[in-house]
Amino acid sequence: MLFHDEMIDPFQACQAFASASAVDADLQVRLYTLMLKCRRAEERAAELAETREVGCPVHLYLGQEAVSAGVCTALKTEDQVFGTHRSHGHFLCKGGGLRPLFAELLGKATGCARGRGGSMHLIDTSCGIPGTTPIVAASIPMAAGAALANKMKKNGLVAVAFFGDGATEEGVFHETMVMAAIWDLPVVFICENNFYASHLPLKDRRKRDNLADAGKPYSIPSARIDGNNVLEVHRYARAAVEHARSGRGPSFLECRTYRWRGHVGPAWEWNLGIRKREEVEEWLARCPIRALEQQLLAQKLMREEDMTALRQKIDEEIEDALAFARQSPYPAMDTLLRHVYVER
Amino acid sequence: MYICENNGWAMSTPAQEVSAGRSFARRGEAYGILYKTIDGNDVEEVFDNVRAAITMVLHGEAPTLLECRTWRVKGHSRSDQNLYRDKMLEQEWLASDPLQRLRAEILQRKEATAADVEAVEAKVRQHIGAALEKCRQLPPAPAQTAFEKVYAPAYPAAKAAPASAAVEQKAYWQAIQEALCEALDRDERYFIFGEDVAEYGGCFKVTRGMLKRYGKGRIVNTPVSEAGIIGLAVGAAMGGLRPVAEIMFMDFILLAADQLCNHAAKLHYIYNGQVKVPLVVRTPMGGYRGYGATHSQCFDSLLMKVPGLRVVTPWSPRDAKGLLRTCLAGDDPVVFVEHKALYGTIGPVPTTDEYLPLGQAAIVREGKDITLCANSYMVSLCLQAAELLAREGVQAEIVDLRCLAPLDRDTVAKSAAKTQALVIVEEGPLTLGLGAEIAASVQELAFGYLDAPILRVAAADTPVPSAPELERAVLPSVEKIAATVRRALATRG
C-alpha cells in the first residue's frame, strides 16, 4: 500500500477515560486559579490599553481561558508551547510571570523580551515558552520543528502549537500537518476556534463548519471539543499529550470557544456590523470561569469566600506586577544593537 | 477542477515517503471538494471521469479533485540519471504505458487495424521530426529582445491638474478610496480582494463603506491566506479581471512572495508579452506604532529588486490618488505601498481627474543648500527637519521619490547637482537599501557637482523593537535627519 493506514485515535480512548474518571480536586482548583489569573490580568491590561499606558497592540484572550488552562496543565514544565498574537493566556498558564508580562506590555527592560517584543512576542524559556508569533500560522511549523528536535534528541518532550481558526487557511498549516504525520512527531495542534479571524466570521471563510476534519486527510487523529469546558479541554489534551509522548505522533483538537472583545484592543465591538450583540451575550453566558465556579461550589471544593479571597490575592499580584513594571527602567540605548546576531 | 497527476515521485523522493493520509484525493474531504482517485494511465478512464467532473463543476456542485495515478517514465530532469527507483516497480509501470494500453485496446476491439495504428504513429513521428528540423533552422532570438516586455506598455497619458485647479482637503485614506471607487464605478472588471475588506473596511479602514456601495460580489473577504490572495489575484488578472488585492501588513507580503515575485512579476516577460497581469496589491508599511518586529517592516526597497513589479510609495493624499489611478489603469503588477502613519494626514487633492506618471519624483520643498531625498512617511519627517534647519539658516530641498520602480534618478541627481549635497532618508534598514541605490546613481550622474559625501538616514540594521524608546532609537527621526544634514554640511568647510 502506498499510504499510511489510519492511526489509532487517542480520543476514542479518551472518551472512555473521560466518562470514567474525574479531574481531581486540587487540579480543578488549579485550573480555576489559572483561568482567573488570566482573566483579571487581561482586564487590567485592557484598562491600561484604554488609557494608552500600554502603547503596543493588545489582543485580548478574554473568554478563551479554558483552552490555555486546560492544555497547559496537561504538560510538563519543559514541554514547549508556541503561541500567537493572542497569547497572554498561554504565557500565564504555562508558567510565565505577571511581572515580566506587565513589564513587556509597558516596553520595559524587565519585560519577558526586554521590551523588544511587546504583547505579541512573549517568551519564557525557563518554563517551555520558546516564543509567540503574531504572523498567522507561524506557531504551527515551529511547534512541529520543536517536536522534531524532541524526537531526535529522544528527550520525551512534547510541543504544542496554539493557533486560531484562521491559521488553518495558511498553506504552512497543511505543509506542517503532512510532516508531523509522516514522522510521527510528538506535537499537539490546538486550534482555538473562536469563529473570527480578525473580523472575518468562519462561515465566510470555510465551506462547512468542520474544522475538526482538518486532520483527517493526513490521518491525524482529530476531535471537536467544547473549548469553554476546561475539564473537557484538559482531559482531551492529556490524551493527546500522552499519545504524542508515547511516540504515536500528532493529534489535532478543535476547541470551540469565543473571543469576547474585538480583534485588537479593549473594545467590545458591538456595533461594527460584524457580530450580533445576542451572539456575544450568548457566549458571555457560557463563561468558562463561571461554569467551573458553579461546579466547584456544587462539589464543595471551594466556598464563595475562598473565591473572593483568591480573587483578591490575584488582584494584589497583578497590582504588584504593574507597580514593578512602572518602576522598571526602559531598555538602555546601548543594548539596541545586541542580539541581532548570536553573541559568543 | 483540479487534476493531481500523482506520478509517485517528487524528484527522487517517493511520494509515499512524504505524504500523509490514505490518498492525496482524500484531502478534498476537509474542504467539501468532491474527490476521486483514478488510473491515470487509462486514457479512457481519465476522459470519462474528467467529463463527469466538468459536468459537476458546471452545475455548481463543487470544485472537484481527480487524483490520477501515473508514472514518470524518465528522471525528473536532464541531470537526473534515474538511479533511485526500484527496477521491478519501474518495469511494472512501464508495462502499463498508457499508449501501449490504448493501442492494444483499439486493436482488440477491432476499432482499427495494426496498419492503421502504425500509419498514425509514422505520421506523428514525421510531424515531430519536421517541426524540430524547422526550429533548428530558425535564427536565435536577437539579444536586444532580452530587454523587452519587462513591463506592459499601456498606461494612460500623464495628466496633472493645473496649478489653478480647484482642490479639496482630503485624508490620505480617502484619496485612496476615491481612486478605488472610480475604478469600480468605471469598469466592472475591478474588484477588491483581501482579509477583512468588506464589513470591517480593511485593517486600516481604507475600504470602509465600499461594501454597501458595491456589494459582496465586488468587495470580497478572503480567508487568512496571503499566498492564496495574491495567487488567485494573479489568476483572475490573467483571466481578464482587474483585481485590487489588499495585504493587511506589508510584513505579510512575504507569505505571498512566490506568487508576487516569481509569478506576477515575471509572467508577462517569460511569455514575451502574451499574458498580462494587471494587478494592484495595496499594503501598508512602516513602524512608529509599537507593533514590533513582525508588523512594522518596510519592504519597499526589497521589492525594487524584482524586475517586473512596479513599486509605488505615495506620501501626499494627492499623489496617493493620482498615482493609484495610473496604477489601476495600467497593465502591470503593482505593489502600492501605503503608510500606516499617513492614513489620517490631510492634504489638497485636485477635483479634476489626474493621472500622475510613475517614475517621476517631485520637489516638495525648494532649497539651495542641501537635497533631502525620501519617500512615503519619510517625506513628512524631512519637512519637519527642513523647518528646524531653516532656523539655522540652512535651506534644504526635498525630493519625494513617489515611486521606487521605476525610479527617477535624474530628478535626484539634478537637485543634488544644484545643492551640491545629498542626504537620503528611508525607513527600511540601511544596508543595501534605497539610499545605497540612489547614492550609487547620483555619483554616476553628478559626481563633479558634489561638494560633500552623500549620507544616509535609515533604520538601524536590526529588527524593529516594540518598546517606544527602542523603536525611536532604531527608526529615522527628525533629529537624526537634521544631525545628518549638519554632518554633511560640516564636511564642506
Image (cartoon, rainbow, N blue to C red):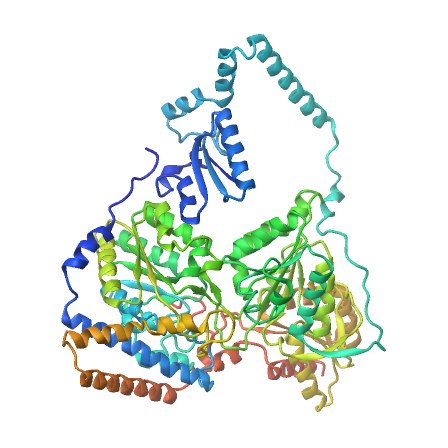
User: Compared with residue B385, is residue A83 higher up or lower down, i.e. above or below?
Assistant: above
Residue A325 position in % (x across, y down): 36, 85
Residue A244 position in % (x across, y down): 25, 54
Quadrant for the C terminus of chain B in the image: bottom right
Lateral position of residue A62 relative to residue B64, left or right? left
Q: Camera-side residue: B488 or B477? A: B477
Q: Quadrant of residue A67?
A: bottom left
Residue B430 visible within the image: no
Name the residue located 35 percent from the left edge and 54 percent from the top edge.
A212
Lateral position of residue B105 relative to residue A321, left or right? right
Residue A211 position in % (x across, y down): 38, 55
Name the residue located 66 percent from the left edge and 17 percent from the top edge.
B126
Residue B395 position in % (x across, y down): 75, 84
Q: Camera-side residue: A115 or B60? A: B60
Name the residue located 49 percent from the left edge and 14 percent from the top edge.
B104
Residue A85 visible within the image: yes
Name the residue located 50 percent from the left edge and 44 percent from the top edge.
B63
* Number of disc labels: 0
User: Compared with residue A67, is residue B92 higher up or lower down, i.e. above or below?
Assistant: above
